[in-house]
Image (cartoon, grey):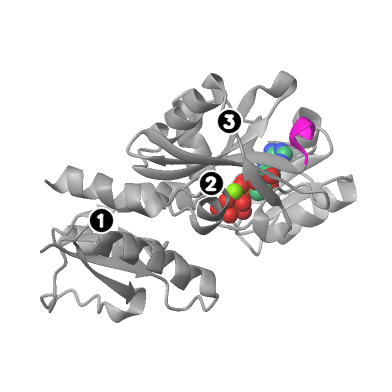
């Protein structure tokens, strides 16, 4: 019998992280795999000792990239691959990769590194960004989830306050896709195939995230949406991906982001599709 670890972050106390791990562990058990839910800090990353236990594979639901790398380096298959988790965990890095692969997305400018104790205000750099993207615009931190680090900037005053506040942090400037205000599509992909999708919309916020008050419903994807979502997951080499799509001019799909550890509870409730079963099936097929 194969053994799998489902790893999530033990410092996150919200029930949804444990719930996500349980969905995966239950799916593994249904497939005849012995599954154990493991919190990241329960694995001692001792570099000069052997691991006491070794699973046959790990489903990695967290962003503890060092742990994912540590496990991969001792020869344990980790899903997603640590490099994919790392790319997706930093939106700036991810957009560079998406652009390299010609993926349609909002116009995006990666903010230059500014050391926290210094400033480039007065250099004219930020004025150029304002000229190129106009207002309103989106500023998005590299590391953020549930829409919490995504800002709609409407005035120059807000713009300069935000760039000042973000000194020392990776972030991007992005065209605000007005035609997508409060709505997007989440597409879950497993091994290059679309397994579920939902439409998310919010009456109260420009962000469609359910955690921000968005409401989800079933959606039939267009051929163009399907193709773009699959290409986006492929561009960052994600075997499991939650791709967010925006609606551009004439509903033209644009990639908002690719999540490497997308939550699957909401999409399960909305569509009845348990993405966890597909993930486990994919892994077992790959390891066979
Ligand atoms: N350029 C944009 N134009 C219009 N709306 C956007 C844009 N970027 C993001 N949004 C809205 O904000 C929401 C959150 O943005 P994004 O998905 O990039 O970050 P996140 O949700 O914090 O990340 P995660 O999905 O990992 O939780 C999107 O679902 C979308 O509704
Ligand atoms: Mg998102």
Q: Quadrant of residue 107?
A: top right
Q: Quadrant of residue 255?
A: top right
Residues in magenta?
A: 176-181
Q: Residue at x 63, y 36 (%)?
A: 109
Q: Is mark 3 within 8 Å of ligand 1?
A: no
Q: Residues within 10 Å of mark 2 (few under 14, many from 20)?
A: some
Q: CA distance from mark 2 to mark 1?
A: 27 Å
Image marks 2 and 1: residues in contact by CB distance under 8 Å: no
Q: Residue at x 65, y 64 (%)?
A: 117
Q: Position of residue 82 (x, y in %)?
A: 32, 53
Image-based side of 237 in relation to 19, left or right:
left
Between residues 214 and 52, which one lies in front from this camera angle?
214
Q: CA distance from mark 2 to mark 3?
A: 11 Å
Picture disc at residue 78? 1
**Residue on which the image places disc 3:** 220
Q: Quadrant of residue 180?
A: top right
* Among the two numbered marks 2 and 1 on one chain, the one whose residue lies closer to the N terminus: 1
Q: Residue at x 48, y 55 (%)?
A: 264
């Amino acid at each position: 019998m194969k053994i799998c670890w489902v790893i999530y972050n033990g410092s996150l106390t919200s029930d949804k992280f444990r719930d996500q791990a349980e969905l995966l562990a239950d799916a593994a058990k249904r497939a005849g795999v012995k599954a154990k839910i493991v919190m990241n800090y329960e694995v001692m990353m001792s570099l000069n000792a052997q691991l006491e236990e070794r699973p046959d594979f790990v489903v990695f639901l967290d962003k503890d990239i060092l742990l994912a790398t540590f496990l991969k380096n001792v020869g344990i298959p980790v899903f997603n691959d640590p490099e994919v988790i790392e790319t997706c965990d930093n939106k700036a890095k991810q957009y560079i990769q998406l652009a390299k692969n010609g993926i349609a997305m909002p116009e995006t400018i990666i903010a230059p590194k500014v050391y926290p104790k210094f400033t480039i205000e007065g250099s004219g750099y930020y004025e150029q960004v304002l000229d190129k993207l106009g207002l309103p615009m989106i500023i998005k931190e590299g590391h953020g989830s549930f829409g919490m680090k995504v800002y709609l900037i409407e005035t120059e005053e807000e713009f300069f306050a935000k760039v000042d506040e973000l000194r020392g942090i990776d972030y991007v400037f992005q065209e605000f896709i007005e035609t997508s205000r409060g709505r997007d599509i989440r597409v879950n992909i497993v091994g290059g195939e679309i397994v579920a999708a939902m439409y998310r919309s919010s009456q109260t916020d420009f962000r469609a995230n359910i955690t921000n008050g968005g409401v989800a419903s079933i959606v039939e994807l267009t051929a163009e949406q399907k193709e773009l979502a699959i290409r986006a997951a492929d561009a960052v080499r994600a075997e499991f991906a939650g791709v967010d799509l925006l609606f551009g001019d004439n509903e033209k799909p644009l990639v908002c982001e690719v999540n490497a550890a997308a939550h699957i509870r909401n999409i399960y409730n909305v569509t009845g599709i348990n993405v966890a079963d597909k993930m486990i099936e994919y892994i077992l097929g790959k390891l066979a």
